[in-house]
Amino acid sequence: MGSGAYSVFIDQQAAGGPPAFRRVVPLPPPELSGAVKFSTVVLSLAYDNFGEAGAPPTIPGTVRVLRGSGTVDTLHVTIEVGRKWFHFLHADDQAASVQLDPPASFRPQVTALVEYTTP
């Protein structure tokens, strides 16, 4: 059995985009459902405020798990300092969109981590 991981930094879009912090994270097909077989796939979010005075201890956000069937599972999350939010993915989960809703004056440092195993 093998394993791997990759990360995507959740940042504000460049010029011309909305002011929201948004990214779409592609997912390997879990539960042996794709052409390349992955058994377990987990999405987690990591955050740190670097101990800055006035920095929030948590960041609210929304994770939308996009499925091949066209359905969407919307999860409202509170991201704490560290890596404490995890979501195990299932067959037909193809991507996850992550939107952060920080206070207007704060630019959060949040990263999505995708971990996976192969049989």
Image: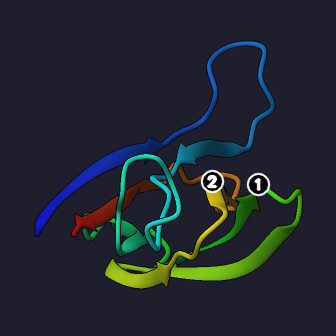
In what element is the residue under mark 2?
A: strand
In the rendered image, which quarter is residue 16 located in?
top right
Q: Is residue 90 above or below residue 116?
A: below
Residue 34 in the figure: left or right of residue 117:
right
Q: Is residue 5 above or below residue 62?
A: above
In the rendered image, which quarter is residue 61 located in?
bottom right
In the rendered image, which quarter is residue 80 located in?
bottom left
Q: Along the line of sight, which residue is nearer the eye, 31 or 93?
A: 31
Q: Along the line of sight, which residue is nearer the eye, 82 or 56?
A: 82
- Amino acid carrying label 1: it is Gly
Q: How is the image coloured?
A: rainbow
Disc 1 to disc 2: CB gap under 8 Å: yes
Q: Label 2 belongs to which residue?
A: 94
Q: Along the line of sight, which residue is nearer the eye, 30 or 80?
A: 30
In what element is the residue under mark 1?
A: loop
Q: Residue at x 59, y 70 (%)?
A: 91
User: Could you say which disc has been placed on residue 112 in the image?
Assistant: none
Q: Residue at x 18, y 56 (%)?
A: 4
